[in-house]
Image (cartoon, rainbow, N blue to C red):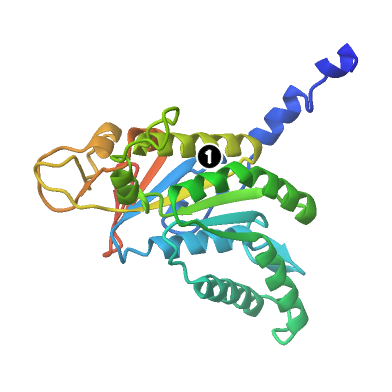
Amino acid sequence: MELSQWIDGDESASEMLGRVLKERTSLVVPPLHRVPLRVGNVVELVGPSGSAKTQILIQAAVNCILPKEWNGIHYGGLGCSAVFIDLDCRLDITRLLQVLKLRILEAISNGSLNTGDGENFDALYATCLRRFFYIRCYDSFEFLATLKTMHHKLQKERDGLGVGLHLLVIDSIGAYHWVDRISSSLPPWGHNRKGFSLANVLEAAVEEVRKLLLVHPSIVIASRATIFGDRSSNVVRRDKSLSESELRHGKPDGGLGLYREYMPSAWQTNILHLAVVSINQHILLNGCYHP
């Protein structure tokens, strides 16, 4: 290989900056429309069971895979790919299909296209589904393996579909917390094997997500179920006067609306935006309360 060929990179600095810093339309689904999201951001969606976290993720994915416009009809989507990593293994895929169908039919009914044109509906429906990738993982090691191999799959799909990744969904990031916590107390399997711990797993996952965002600039949304705390636990209070530090580490002052922060610091420091949702539809975004 000649020296000049070795010095020449795969892309220039301006091309790299244009790829990484390229502006894209943000997600517009509540409550994420209140957050100034940009590609490369990691958002954590926190709430108890029954607070519609998965439904919010489904709506965000549908908004991502829908086109902005199709055959003269405005759909308001992003026309990009979305990856949904299901760690809870409880996603009902028919819910996503129903939301997608309703969004398409609603846009058609508001437009000038004949609603009886089934071919256009089927073509758009199939195009959207080709942009959606669903992955189910059953433990932390499958999750890490998925992240490590995702680049090659996304590159192949981007070349085939002509669109890149815009949204990476993880539901739920704390799914294996307690299993891994028990496993971390077990002895190593070999003399040269590094001890298994929650910190090791999350550090590896965070590093793989960062690498993925460098090559495939996108938005990451990870849901997490809450564990409600008491006076003796590390808690977070839903209060509009909380600072970011107080929001993360909490104050042991008791009261209603407290939840315990149980994720390791390796994951916590990776979060740029925090959205706390409740069953009564109250929302806390980055420390600001929204009814």
Image label count: 1
SS category of the residue bearing label 1: helix
Residue under the image location 16 percent in, 37 percent down: 251
User: What is the x, y in percent for residue 93?
Assistant: 52, 71
Left or right for 126, reference 8: left
For residue 20, which quarter of the picture? top right
- 7 above or below 115? above
Name the residue carrying label 1.
209
- 171 above or below 233? below
- 218 above or below 111? above
Q: Nearer the viewer, residue 137 or 28?
A: 137
Q: Residue furthest right?
A: 2
Residue under the image location 65 percent in, 37 percent down: 215
Q: Residue furthest top?
A: 3
Question: In this rendering, does residue 266 appear at all?
Answer: yes
Quadrant showing the N terminus: top right
User: What is the x, y in percent for residue 157?
Assistant: 73, 53
At label 1, counting other C-alpha atoms closer than 10 Å, the crowd grade (few under 14, some 14-19, many 20 or more) is many
Q: Given the image, on which type of amino acid does mark 1 rest? A: Val
